[in-house]
Amino acid sequence: MNKYIPIIIFFITGCSEIYNFSEEDQFRLKRSSINYYEYADPSEEILNLAIQNDPKAQMSVGIYISNKGNESASTARKYLKHAAENGFAEAYYHLGLHYFNGYKIKKAKGLGGVISLLQYFTSDATTSYKDAKYVSYKKAYEYFELAAQANIAEGQNLTGFMLIKGLGTNIDKNEACHWFDLGAKNNHEAAQLNYASYCLNDDEKRVVLSKIAENNALAAYELAIEYLLLQYEDDRNALSSEYELEDFERSSIELIKAKGIDVPSSFTAQKLSDYWMKISAEGGYSTAKVYLER
């Protein structure tokens, strides 16, 4: 039997789906809100309400237990599933996060140890066994999609992200854009960014990015690159004071003027690019910082 163990382990590890998240991904996954109970112990009243089948209380307790990391993952899932089944659809999104972020794998002996190893080798996380946690993008996608179908903006953005990256599901740009669009219409900033980046043509993309770039470092960076590219277009290689600004460029200039910055009539696409690159760097996007330091 022992001689088959390496083969079994090779087969199991081949089933895992490793993905290394970049700084860019963090901006595309940025959440629009944080639940209070993720950082505070549920009161006795909340715990009692959860036991009495109050869905909002069940979700809050489930989120808290899931995020503590040293508590029972199965207990967290139980509360979150009850909340979803009792009509609180946002719980589907948090169930998705439970599998997307992962939970600590309990070490055990005997049969329990075998189960722990199976979890470790089938996890999508890249950790040592000592720090092992179980991540499943397939399960995360299933719950995010349920949240998205229930019009939860966070779920719509995550569903689109996983479809565009092929995490837990097949790559499907059209379906991803469908969910990004719905999330954007629900005023989810990261969904607006993703919809602009992946689903719009250049002119439409600049219009959307200009609306969110002031408070989103990645959007500011992409807008800076868009303006930079305009410098190299054959029909715009002689930008000057006679350059006719488009509506989205006027919007950017109005934002700059509102900050009390003098804008000369000869303001060009290059200057707009420089401005948004600086905003991106100030917002913490390291790629923009490197660009400005070169």
Image (cartoon, rainbow, N blue to C red):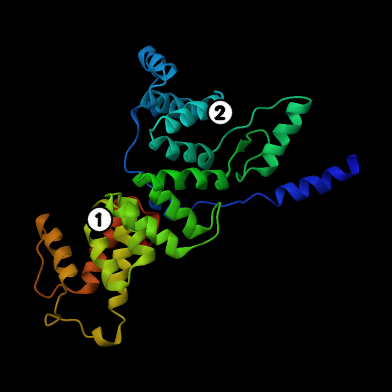
In the rendering, at what x and y percent does residue 38 appear? Answer: 40, 29
Q: Earlier in the sequence, mark 1 or mark 2?
A: 2
Whether residue 95 is visible here, answered yes or no, is yes
Image coordinates for residue 239, horizontal then vertical, percent = 20, 81
Q: Which mark is residue 73?
A: 2
* Residue beneath the point at 35% across and 32% down: 35
User: Residue drawn 52% across and 61% down?
Assistant: 171
Residue 189 shown left or right of residue 143 in the figure: left
Kindly state the secondary structure of the residue where label 1 is placed: helix
Q: Is residue 26 visible?
A: no
Looking at the rendered structure, which numbered label has been put on residue 129?
A: none
Quadrant in which the N terminus is drawn: top right
Q: Where is residue 261 in the image (x, y as percent from the top left)?
A: 11, 59
Q: Name the residue located 39 percent from the left edge and 26 percent from the top edge.
A: 55
Q: Which amino acid does label 2 sit on?
A: Ala
- Looking at the picture, tell me which residue is in the foreground, 151 or 273: 151
User: How many circles with numbers are drawn on the protein?
Assistant: 2
Residue 198: % across, % down: 39, 64
Residue 163 left/right relative to 288: right
